Image: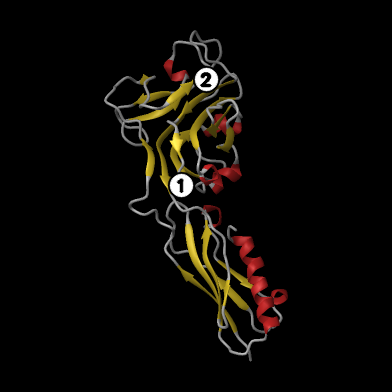
């Protein structure tokens, strides 16, 4: 009787090598003890729509002696909670914080920490936090690639739950491989949707070289079919066991199981070597081909291609 086995050889999750290039690493720490400072690190800039005198209503370096997310400083922006104040600041409006220009000469990932007020953002729809990519200096035409009001983007880029919890520090990680070979700026956008809103803090902005998602490429031999290195990101990190049974195989009495046991998670990235092992010799090409086709279709459901 012919028997088939699907073996999943686990590799460590794609760790960034110790020498991986970091082209931006900003924690906004400074010696200043001004509570709301308009002075950002070299290369950073803002596009302000607020024209009043209250520095906390535009992007600022916020200082709190008891500590922010990390250290005593972070980037912050706020708005009035009530209308009619002497400082103005009512919305709708946008406040934009821009990173220095980044030369993406390889594949890079953006990561940053953030926290905000979920009631104002989610329940009341008062504001949004967006990340945009600026190319050729065109801030107005920047592409929005992430929003903390988008449940899918939250999950795909750091496995952040939706609705998220107020004043909880979350880390978001975004693949910048789409812009490889270009010079870009990252725009952090505080977008007021109504007249009042609430505060947003960000910290630990890092752009670091990493290995992006790759798909399975099969290599066939008489005894095995090796898909090569297969990538999974955080959206599928909860995947456990999945099987190829019944209609996916000609020999229904011999179910072939694809066993997925996730053993590592570094920044939401997973890597595997997926191999189909054929234990018995003399397998007819039709049966093997049918099985391999099933694996392809199965892998497409769970792995990034």
User: Which residue is rendered at x = 55% and y = 82% of the image?
Assistant: 223
Quadrant placement of the C terminus = bottom right
- 222 or 112: nearer the eye? 222
| Residue farthest along the bottom direction in this orientation | 1
Residue 79 in view, yes or no: yes
Assign a secondary structure to mark 2: loop
User: Which residue is rendered at x = 52% and y = 11% of the image?
Assistant: 88
Instruction: Residue 245: give x, y in percent of width and height.
Output: 67, 75
Q: Quadrant of residue 136?
A: top right
Instruction: Residue 85: give x, y in percent of width and height.
Output: 51, 10
Instruction: Residue 163: give x, y in percent of width and height.
Output: 56, 41
Residue 199 in view, yes or no: no
User: Which residue, given by chain and number where applicable, does mark 1 sit on?
Assistant: 106
User: Which residue, given by chain and number where applicable, does mark 2 sit on?
Assistant: 81
Give the colour scheme of this rendering.
Answer: secondary structure
Q: Between marks 2 and 1, how big is the CA–CA gap?
A: 43 Å
Instruction: Residue 9: give x, y in percent of width and height.
Output: 48, 71
Tell which circle, 2 or 1, labels the residue nearer the N-terminal end: 2
Horizontal arrangement in the rendering, residue 247 relative to residue 256 (left or right): right
Q: Give the total of numbered labels.
A: 2
Q: Between tags 2 and 1, which lies in front?
A: 1
Q: Crowding at label 2, few (<14), some or many (≥20) Cα neighbours within 10 Å?
A: some
């Amino acid at each position: 009787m012919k028997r088939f086995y699907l073996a999943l050889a686990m590799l460590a999750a794609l760790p960034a090598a110790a020498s991986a290039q970091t082209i931006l690493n900003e924690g906004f720490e400074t010696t200043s003890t001004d509570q709301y400072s308009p002075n950002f690190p070299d290369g950073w800039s803002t596009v302000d729509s607020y024209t009043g005198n209250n520095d906390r209503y535009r992007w600022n370096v916020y200082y709190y002696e008891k500590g922010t997310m990390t250290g005593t400083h972070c980037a912050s922006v706020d708005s009035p909670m009530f209308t009619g104040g002497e400082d103005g600041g009512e919305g709708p409006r946008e406040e934009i914080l821009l990173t220095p220009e980044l030369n993406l000469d390889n594949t890079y990932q953006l990561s940053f920490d953030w926290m905000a007020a979920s009631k104002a953002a989610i329940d009341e729809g008062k504001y949004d936090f967006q990340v945009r990519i600026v190319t050729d200096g065109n801030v107005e035409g920047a592409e929005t690639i992430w929003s903390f009001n988008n449940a899918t983007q939250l999950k795909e880029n750091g496995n952040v739950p939706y609705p998220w919890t107020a004043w909880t520090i979350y880390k978001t990680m975004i693949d910048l491989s789409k812009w490889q070979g270009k010079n870009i700026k990252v725009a952090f956008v505080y977008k007021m949707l109504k007249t009042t809103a609430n505060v947003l803090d960000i910290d630990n902005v890092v752009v670091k070289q990493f290995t992006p998602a790759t798909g399975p490429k099969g290599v066939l031999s008489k005894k095995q079919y090796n898909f090569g290195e297969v990538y999974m990101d955080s959206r599928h990190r909860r995947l456990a066991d999945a099987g190829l049974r019944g209609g996916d195989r000609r020999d229904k009495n011999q179910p072939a199981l694809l066993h997925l046991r996730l053993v590592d998670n570094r920044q939401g990235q997973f890597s595997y070597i997926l191999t189909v092992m054929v234990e018995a010799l003399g397998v007819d090409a039709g049966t093997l081909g049918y099985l391999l086709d099933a694996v392809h279709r199965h892998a497409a459901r769970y792995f990034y291609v």
